[in-house]
Amino acid sequence: MPAQPDLPLAAPELLDSMLTRKFGPEVQNYFSGSPLNRLSFLRTDHAFLAAALTHHSTAFVAVDDLAPAARDAANLAYVSHADLSAVIGENPFAKTEAEMIEAYNSKVASPLILFLGINDKRHEGFEYKAYKGVPYFAVDITPKGSHEEAAKGVIETLKAKNLIFLQGRSAMTLNASDAAIFAQARALLDWNARNPFCSGCGQPTLSVHAGTKRVCPTADLAPGASARGPCATRGVVSNLSFPRTDPTVIMAVISHDGTKVLLGRQKRWPTDWYSTLAGFCEPAESVEEAVRREVWEESGVRVGRVVVHSSQPWPYPANLMIGAIGQAVKGGEEINLEHDPELEQAKWFDFETVRVALKTGTSGLDEAPGEGRKEGDLRLPGHTAIANQLLQAVVLGGFLGGETKI
Amino acid sequence: MPAQPDLPLAAPELLDSMLTRKFGPEVQNYFSGSPLNRLSFLRTDHAFLAAALTHHSTAFVAVDDLAPAARDAANLAYVSHADLSAVIGENPFAKTEAEMIEAYNSKVASPLILFLGINDKRHEGFEYKAYKGVPYFAVDITPKGSHEEAAKGVIETLKAKNLIFLQGRSAMTLNASDAAIFAQARALLDWNARNPFCSGCGQPTLSVHAGTKRVCPTADLAPGASARGPCATRGVVSNLSFPRTDPTVIMAVISHDGTKVLLGRQKRWPTDWYSTLAGFCEPAESVEEAVRREVWEESGVRVGRVVVHSSQPWPYPANLMIGAIGQAVKGGEEINLEHDPELEQAKWFDFETVRVALKTGTSGLDEAPGEGRKEGDLRLPGHTAIANQLLQAVVLGGFLGGETKI
């Protein structure tokens, strides 16, 4: 389990609780465990946002094309308003949302400024109503549109200060707390970038709620903009206006007698590398049903009881991984890869083999396996993957023993 | 718990399993428990779809503006291809997907025909490769576009056969099996209807994968259609192309000492009517974190350990309700409605009050409460709501007693 340096709840309280005694301490998977209080209800309060954006203590995550500025592989760089002022420009929260919508011009591309929350364990002078703490924002400094040159300048200045930009999955070396903050920034910046148009009417949309909602304005002041027709997203609460998160199931399936666990591999993975099965939840399917369907489609194995173990946000781009443990029904363990041929192989592994692999064979897909691994032994995902946590829960005792560990 | 007449897994198998002994039998909430095998991997196989659509045994759910045709309040009407042929027209699956995309014309509005799955417990002659069973489709017979008149005719014919159309939430009187089939149809028909345009580039899109995917074609044969630019959803797997399901948390929160449960009410609800708190998961948030954030924002209560109990698909329009039980941290029970003023009231109720309400005070929001309820007693949602199941798990023993019931 990844280090969780800054948990929102103190461990002694957790250990004191009734549910903890029964279910064991919570597994907080990588990308969860953010130290920030999102204060989601203040995202429409422009006075709050305007004050938070310009406070001297405020911390900014600068993101270029989804790569965050960092001090090193393990730590984000929290930069200041002054570092980014060339991109931020005038305080975008000086206006109310109603004013922003009325002034909408689809040809004016403002940089996306995302309010992440406040760290209420740190007090450096920022206060608003009942809330105190250090405000956090993310700013999209991708060079484009009218702020292209300003953004390039900001990026050069940050690089001159020896900051680096963590590209792609290299952000997964961040410490747990920074990883959770980055996950929030990445998911929302990416959602805004992927959805510049309204899927209800096809017209361009405007980012509001400090980066967490997009609205379809009734009019567009851009010269030559076509008249906008009616749109179903206006006037009613529409899920199309809000960020999309795709629920996904990932499951350690045990044999009916509880001695083996089902793993699968894709063709492009390194030799001997396996993981738990996974797939997207479909509309009108419970988590438990999605687990049973995906396991059967990919491996032919029929699963009975399913229990949720823990969950993990996965910001590539917007998944919520729901980690479960399932058990094959009696006689349902035969493997058949012919239904949905997604996997190159699916196999039952005895617990001891998985235990050995958890000790010596874990790594990222593109990394070398752990030390002490014997050639030909099973390889598994590392501790930042929920698959690893699910397998620990199954084979390291507790979950299947006398004491329930989830 | 709603009757589950046609579960995909036999109860004796479930009861035999290790996980069941430990966690108790699974709660299958209303709208889950579909008897259909979705065979999701055959949605691109036009030969399969074309044969299934026209087989004599195939069952059709006819849906007018999201209201399904029904025999009565408890039973869907499964009609035949002949009943709907005026709307279906020529077999839309005669062409491959590649051919459909190449022939794309945004001015031709074909009725949406959705493959739901096969009931593999019934054999009436349909077979394809290794799969046998009765195929199920849903057809959108909403009168519109070029098939408006045909659809009106079909609707009149069905009504003349004494079928009714279940509007809005009145579909929640359906038996559990039909409710699950309807939920799948409603979620997908609604998703297609809400998303006629590509949110990546603003152009109209085409339904493929038998109603479970929308693609953004490179060209549009409609006269006068503008040239289509590049689109990020082409060429890569994009979540924008697939149905959206919004993960939602709903939670029974118990006091730290395990004697009371936290309920809230909205202003528009009937007097004395309360339910468990609920809210949407945000990007980059685990289920457990979403529970703690929502409870604190809406009620001020601070929650420690969170355990997932069960889940429920909710097709109004596309939620996945993840039902959890959480426990307040020591000293975290004070109620504060000032953060996010969504609730009119939030209160702690002792278990006995909730037990009485579960016996005599449950109903839908617009129904009369159960018999035997005393004036002024607590009212709660009925058994089709996951809130009801969560409260049962908490106050009817098992979950907090010696035996783990989830």
Image: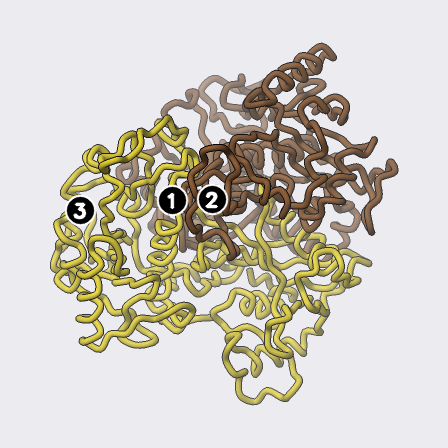
Chain colours: A brown, B yellow
Disc assigned to residue B180: none
Instruction: Please tell me whether mark 3 or mark 2 is closer to you in this view.
Output: 3
Q: Residues within 10 Å of mark 2 (few under 14, many from 20)?
A: many
The chain identifier of the residue carrying mark 1 reads A
When asked about the image quadrant of residue A111, the answer is top right
Label 3 in the same subunit as label 1: no
Residue B198 at x, y = what percent? 39, 38
The chain identifier of the residue carrying mark 2 reads A
Q: Give A287 or A361, whichever is nearer the viewer.
A: A287
Q: Residues within 10 Å of mark 1 (few under 14, many from 20)?
A: many
Question: Residue tagged by mark 3?
Answer: B92
Distance Cα–Cα, label 2 vs label 1: 8 Å
The amino acid pointed to by label 3 is: Pro
Residue A79 at x, y = what percent? 74, 24
Q: Is residue B101 left or right of residue A168?
A: left
Quick check: A176 above or below B243? above
Q: Residue at x 43, y 34 (%)?
A: B200
Q: Residue at x 67, y 64 (%)?
A: B343
The chain identifier of the residue carrying mark 3 reads B
Residue farthest toward the top in the current orientation of the protein: A160
Q: Is residue A283 left or right of residue A119?
A: left
Looking at marks 2 and 1 on the same chain, the residue that comes earlier in the sequence is marked by 2
Label 2 in the same subunit as label 1: yes
Disc assigned to residue A294: 1
Residue A87 visible in the shown view: yes
The amino acid pointed to by label 2 is: Val
Q: Residue at x 37, y 48 (%)?
A: A293
Distance Cα–Cα, label 3 vs label 2: 32 Å
Residue A106 at x, y = what percent? 51, 34
Residue A263 visible in the shown view: no
**Residues at marks 3 and 2 touching, judged by CB atoms closer than 8 Å:** no
**Residues at marks 3 and 1 touching, judged by CB atoms closer than 8 Å:** no
